[in-house]
Image (spheres, helix red, strand yellow):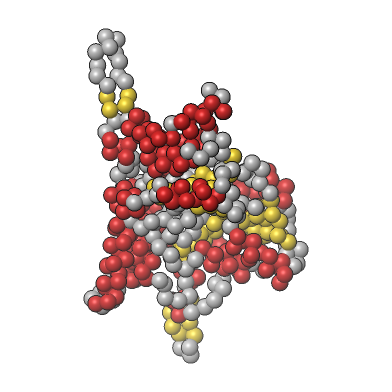
Amino acid sequence: MNNVNRRHFLKASAIGLSALPAARGLAASTPGDGSAPLTRTPPHRLDDPLGVRASFPVTEELAYLNTASVGPLSIPVRDALHAYADEKMRRRNTSSGREAIASARSRFARVFGTEEDEIAFLYATSGAENIIASALDWRAGDNVVVDELHFVTTFVLYRELERRHGIALRIIPSREGVVSVDDFAEHTDDRTRLISVAWVSNRNGFRYDLPPLADLAHAHGAYLYADAIQAWGTFPTNLHDEKVDFACGNGYKWLHADFGCAPFYVRAEHLEWMTADRHGHSQVAETLPGHRFRLKTSAAKLEYANPAYGPVSAMAAALEFLEGVGPDRIAAHVQGLAGELRTEAEALGMRLFTPPGNPSAIVSFHHGLDHERLALALEGEGVAVTFQEDGALLRAAVGMFNNRSDVDRLLGVLAGMV
């Protein structure tokens, strides 16, 4: 079927798209005598592949394909926040905050393959890159290598370092939504101090293979930082094996925690020289005579003040939930469903910004339609996505709670307008 006919077929079938999940559940079983009946995949496996939709009430109202913007809370995380607020209100357990910190730190280390001493809890993802930039001894003529798929905070930070320290910010353009290791190699030299990437791009979901980038950076005496806010919680990983020097991401997206708790990974070998960009009482390991102090030496030395206990409590509960579902199962589900969405959006004539075969949960494309009409149509069908580039670029994000019906609702709106 050629592309034009495929678009015509999908447009004509828009009304029937919502029936596709049930149809996919039928599988013919026809042994030699043809006597066996049809077998049916249990409906719950189609409607709720990971068995988590009941924990996300957002699914009762919306086809929520927008976790790349803000991930909805699950009921267990909501309950953890409620319990924290209740404890604070009644003051029954004054150690609950410290217990939440210990739980979140140990769970994160276990899920993401780190040591507890390598994890600090910051308030925002941007805090990590600011700490790194503050700790490095910049000299005029040094450079930082990034690419155009990065988040805006990175550009703001290094433009300011250009102004203050005379460094050079080297920005690599993408080609068909991809930036390769070879592209980075062309821009990296012995004056490069840092390579910084969005591990999974917020713009199109492109996912970087970190070990080759780390090898490139280390060959030039540089470091690799990964903004992991679009990565944490979407696929299994061992940060030691990734070879990345630093990584950070907040809890309010794919971890389904809350704003205000951003795990910051600092590889152990860098803790000795890594310095905080501000100081306070939380860094004290021991109080000495004469108002002097011995400070912590683990990554917790970057936590200068009281943590946001509510968001940390949410993080501990969210990591417990994530671990129970299984990062490997989540990855298989979201990447498979995102791949289907990408293929079928392309068949409708959408100009894809997400490259084919990309192992992430984000699909981004230029829809070529009237933005306001499309936005209203999606809102009317209860489909939540993000528009970028003045409305021309549509970004859909497949979460652990999404199913084929959610994707079909989006495709049905698109098919009805092409």
| Left or right relative to 403: residue 369 | right
Q: Residue furthest right?
A: 141
Q: Is residue 113 above or below residue 90?
A: above
Q: Quadrant of residue 286?
A: bottom left
Q: Nearer the viewer, residue 24 or 186?
A: 24
Q: Residue at x 73, y 61 (%)?
A: 168
Q: Residue at x 28, y 35 (%)?
A: 43
Question: Percent x, y for residue 136?
Answer: 64, 67
Q: Residue at x 56, y 24 (%)?
A: 2
Question: Percent x, y for residue 387?
Answer: 53, 52
Q: Nearer the viewer, residue 214 or 230?
A: 230
| Residue 68 in view | yes
Q: Is residue 321 above or below residue 280?
A: above
Q: Nearer the viewer, residue 5 or 384?
A: 5
Q: Is residue 253 above or below residue 90?
A: above
| Residue 323 in view | no
Q: Is residue 16 above or below residue 353?
A: above
